[in-house]
Image: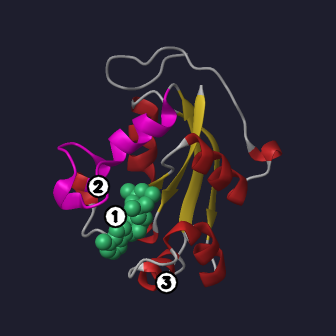
């Protein structure tokens, strides 16, 4: 079992995709074990994306990420980091595979609907950035039904 941080970015919220993103995670066998809507300050977004602080897009990215509410989630499952990144698709939607969230909904490389952690170390750090341990709720699921919904 592995955990990763997902964010539905401001463009995803505006496009009405909170439910669609969660549906894809659940249908993909990942459990949402923590979730909240927040509006980041510019400083909070800068802290979150500090690994990118020397990139030319840093100011634009952190302005965008603090421009409106986002939904932050912890998702859990087998190989959750890799699985989540597969469901998201490549950073640039033009390079994202068919049927991925970014291919289906993103308008450009910056406004790309979702964030997902990229390694176990960053996942731990990113989860900790938004959630104390007591806000995480593990649970078990019955197997997925063929239509992607869960029984039970
Ligand atoms: P990812 O979000 O797929 O992990 P990343 O960590 O390389 O991608 O970059 C973080 C975010 O920064 C990305 O979701 C959108 C933005 N970004 C990345 N490359 C960019 C670029 N060339 N121009 C503008 N924004 C970019
Ligand atoms: Mg990244």
Cα–Cα gap, marks 3 and 1 = 14 Å
Q: Residues within 10 Å of mark 1 (few under 14, many from 20)?
A: many
Using the image as rendered, state which of residue 132 and residue 149 is in the foreground: 132
Report ligand 1 position as a quadrant. bottom left
Residue at the disc numbered 1: 112
Beta carbon of the mark 1 residue lies under 8 A of ligand 1:
yes
Going from N to C along the chain, the mark reached first, 3 or 1, is 3
Query: Which residue is painted at 42% across and 77% down in the image?
Result: 55
Residue 129: which quarter of the image?
bottom right
Q: Position of residue 52 (x, y in %)?
A: 49, 71
The vertical placement of 11 against 152, above or below, is: below
Q: Can residue 80 be found in the magenta stretch?
A: yes
Q: Position of residue 63 (x, y in %)?
A: 49, 84
Using the image as rendered, state which of residue 31 and residue 92 is in the foreground: 92
Q: Can residue 18 be found in the magenta stretch?
A: no
Going from N to C along the chain, the mark reached first, 2 or 1, is 2
Going from N to C along the chain, the mark reached first, 2 or 3, is 3
* Location of the C terminus (image quadrant): top right
Residue at the disc numbered 2: 102
Residue at the disc numbered 3: 63
Cα–Cα gap, marks 2 and 1 = 6 Å
Residue 133: which quarter of the image?
top right
Q: Is residue 94 left or right of residue 31?
A: left
The vertical placement of 67 against 82, above or below, is: below
Q: Is residue 112 left or right of residue 33?
A: left
> In the image, which residues are magenta?
79-102
Q: Are marks 2 and 1 in contact (CB under 8 Å)?
A: yes
Looking at the rendered structure, the number of numbered marks drawn on it comes to 3
Q: Position of residue 76 (x, y in %)?
A: 58, 34
Identify the image's colour scheme: rainbow, by chain, secondary structure or one colour.
secondary structure
Q: Assign a secondary structure to mark 1.
A: loop
């Amino acid at each position: 079992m592995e955990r990763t941080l997902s964010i539905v970015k401001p463009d995803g919220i505006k496009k009405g995709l909170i439910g669609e993103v969660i549906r894809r995670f659940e249908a993909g066998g990942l459990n949402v074990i923590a979730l909240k809507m927040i509006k980041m300050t510019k400083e909070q977004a800068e802290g979150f994306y500090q690994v990118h602080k020397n990139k030319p897009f840093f100011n634009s990215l952190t302005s965008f990420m603090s421009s409106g509410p986002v939904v932050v989630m912890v998702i859990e499952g087998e190989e959750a980091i890799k699985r989540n990144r597969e469901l998201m698709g490549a950073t640039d939607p033009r390079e994202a595979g068919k049927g991925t969230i970014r291919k289906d909904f993103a308008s450009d490389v910056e406004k790309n609907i979702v964030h997902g952690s990229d390694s176990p170390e960053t996942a731990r750090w990113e989860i900790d950035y938004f959630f104390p341990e007591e806000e995480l709720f593990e649970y078990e699921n019955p197997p997925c039904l063929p239509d992607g919904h869960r029984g039970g």
